[in-house]
Amino acid sequence: MLSRANKNILKVKPYVPGKPIDEVRREYGLKKVVKLASNENPYPPSPKVLKAISLAAKKANRYPDGSCFELRQELARRLKLEPEQFVFGCGSDEVIVMAIRSFVEPGDEVVIAKPSFLVYSIASAAAGAVLVEVPLDGLRYDLPAMKAAVNSRTKIVFIGNPDNPSGLYPTSTEIAEFMEGFPSDVLVFFDEAYFEFITGRDYSDTLALLKTHKNVVVARTFSKVYGLAGLRIGYGMADREVAGLLDRAREPFNVNSIAQAAALAALNDGGYYKRIIREQTGERTRLCEALEKMDMEVSRGCTNFIQVRLPRDSGEVVLGLMKKGVIVRDMSAWGLQRYIRVSIGRPSENNRFVKALKEVL
Ligand SMILES: Cc1ncc(COP(=O)(O)O)c(C=O)c1O
């Protein structure tokens, strides 16, 4: 059957997710496994969200509201946008896919940073796009080079704001310069999965760009700070016309009813999530300091993960850590040899990682 498959799909390198906890437990006969590999929130949803989930579960016999009406109204009110400017996805991953589906035809170009979030390249390849990868400058986006890579065949430029794996964002000045004179018929997709973690004053207000630019999409998610990664819900915001185009590329019932109820409840339980952000930010600093004391080079970023440069091959170290019940991400898949990416866990999980790393090294 391979010869009959879609040629673009054959070109796709499958996404390799972080190993699930149960798999590692089974494989190495371990009792307790700590997963710091997928930039998840280490805490469960708030009690109010859990209640909303169980109420929604009672109606799981019905199809969900394909338009996410209530959540749409609530986000529009909070973010001072029109409800029609939103599009909802099964995770913000799906919003990325919808943007590509609605704009990219085989042979069109998509500009991304190298390395950057893997879904940009996977979804572009599946659509038959020509990927134009612009190397990072150190760990930071080289926005002038990305702008220079845009031509009449370019349909979308993806900007991880901040990106994964770097954990860094382009400053508001850099983004303003990038947008200055940028072609109005090329989509600029700001992926803000980690938005709620950011406190920097130099972080760009991309929602303000929506007022002046019809070619901007901003995507956010409930997977990170709001801890709903397992329910899969994210959203995109754009000019009404662009949002409408993305919406056409969506499956009719792509966001399930439990996810919609949970997201709405999470928005209305901000205090719980603010405490988590505060703890995670403090833990990030503590973890980085512990690693720096071990003479490790660390990229702290501003999200719920860090990148660590190891003194030796990352594959060996990742395996050694896994055998000790700690799952982290080997960055060699991104072409970053000797690097691992570590999500910030609960304090006890972070301690366990540091101890295991000392032993493995
Ligand atoms: C930069 C970035 N964008 C988007 C996503 C997708 O998140 P989700 O599909 O869970 O909303 C992730 C997840 O790790 C990410 O790191």
Image (cartoon, rainbow, N blue to C red):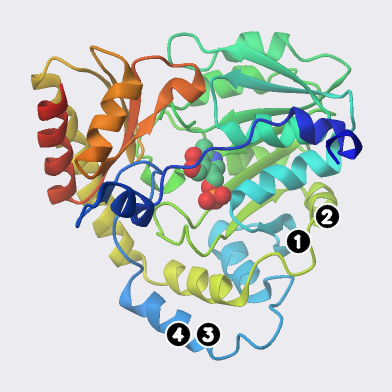
Crowding at label 2, few (<14), some or many (≥20) Cα neighbours within 10 Å?
Answer: some
The image quadrant of residue 104 is top right
Q: Is residue 46 above or below residue 82?
A: below
The kind of residue tagged 3 is Ala
Q: Is residue 257 above or below residue 208?
A: below
Dot label at residue 57: 3
Q: Nearer the viewer, residue 136 or 170?
A: 136
Q: Is there CB contact under 8 Å for labels 4 and 3? A: yes
Residue 56 in the image: state x and y as whole percent: 53, 84
The kind of residue tagged 1 is Glu
Q: Is residue 104 above or below residue 239?
A: above
Q: Secondary structure under badge 2?
A: helix
Q: Is residue 271 left or right of residue 287?
A: right
Does the image show residue 193? no
Q: Which residue is mark 4?
A: 54
Q: Earlier in the sequence, mark 3 or mark 2?
A: 3
Q: Secondary structure under badge 3?
A: helix
Q: Secondary structure under badge 4?
A: helix
Q: Earlier in the sequence, mark 4 or mark 2?
A: 4
Q: Nearer the viewer, mark 3 or mark 1?
A: 3
Q: Earlier in the sequence, mark 1 or mark 4?
A: 4
Crowding at label 3, few (<14), some or many (≥20) Cα neighbours within 10 Å?
Answer: some
Q: Which residue is mark 1?
A: 84
